Image (spheres, rainbow, N blue to C red):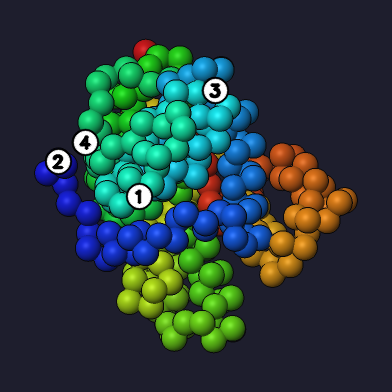
Amino acid sequence: MNAWRLELEIQEYYEQGGERDRLTKSGRGRLEFARMQDLLRRTLPGDGLDVLDVGGATGIHSEWLASDGHRVTLIDPVESQVAVAAELPGVTARVGDVRDLPCDDDSFDAVLLMGPLYHLTEPDDRVRALREARRAAREGGVLAAVTIDRAAGWADWLHMRFNGITPIESDESLRALKEGDIGYFDQGLFTTAYLHHPGEIAAEFAGAGMPEVRQYAVQGPAGLISELDDILDHDELGPHYLAAMREIECEPSLLGASGHLLTVADIVG
C-alpha cells in the first residue's frame, strides 16, 4: 500500500459488502448498471483492450468487461473487495490508491474511475487522481470518470426522510446541497463523499490536462421514481426508457438532473 490512507468510515462502509449486489438488487441500481454498460460499450475505443478499473470494488464492471473480451486490471483500496474481484475470470485485482496508481505510464487503452472521485473531498486530490489516470492511459485511449451529481444527495435524503429511513434534518440536507459534501456514515446510509456540479468535474479534468470532455447523464431525470423495477421489467417501457436516455444523455440542461454523471476524455499526445 502507498502513503495514502483510506478514511476509516469509508473503509468500514465498503467492508460491509454492499457493493456485491448494489447494482442488481433494486430498480435504481439496475438502471445505473444498464446505462453504464451501454455508455462504456459505446465509449471504449475498440475490442480486446487493456482496461484499468480503478476503485472497481468487487468487480461488478470488471466482470462484464472481461466477458466482453477485454484484459481487465482492477485496483481498489479495500482489501476485502480486491479478494472478491480476484476470483473473477479474466480479472487481475490488486490493492492500490487512485492518487498513486501501482502501474507504469501508458499501460492501458481505457482507464475507468467508476467511484473513487466522489470519495476524495479535496479538489487537489481529485485533480491528482485524474492526472494519475491520465499517466496510466495510452495515447488514443480514453479516461472515463463517474461522479455523483450535486442534487442527488438531496433527492436521496428527500426520499428517505419521507419514508422515515433517516433522521438527518432539513438544514443539514440543504447545507449538503449548497456545499456538496456529505457524511452519512453514522447512519449506515452512505459514507464521506463529495457531490459535483457538472461544470466542476469538467474543470477538474481541465486541471489535469484534459480540457476537452464529453459528459453523459447516467440515470436521467426519472432515476429516482419508486416504480423503476416495474418500468425496467415492462416489455414496452423498459426498452423505451433506455432508448429515450440515449436521446437526452448529453443535453446540457439535464446533466445535473441525474444521479450520476459520466465524464469522458480522449487521450491525445
Circle 2 or circle 4, nearest the eye:
2
CA–CA distance between discs 1 and 3? 22 Å
Q: Position of residue 5 (x, y in %)?
A: 17, 51
Circle 4 or circle 1, nearest the eye:
1
Q: Which residue is mark 4?
A: 100
How many discs appear?
4
Q: Which residue is mark 3?
A: 69
- Which of the marked residues, 1 or 3, is nearer the chain's N terminus? 3
**Residue 31 visible at all:** yes
Q: Position of residue 181 (x, y in %)?
A: 36, 64
Question: For numbered disc 3, what is the local secondary structure?
Answer: loop
Q: Residues within 10 Å of mark 1 (few under 14, many from 20)?
A: many
Q: Which residue is mark 1?
A: 81
Q: Are the residues tagged 1 and 3 within 8 Å (C-beta)? A: no
Image point (14%, 41%), residue name: 2
- Which of the marked residues, 3 or 4, is nearer the chain's N terminus? 3
Q: Residues within 10 Å of mark 4 (few under 14, many from 20)?
A: some
CA–CA distance between discs 1 and 2? 17 Å
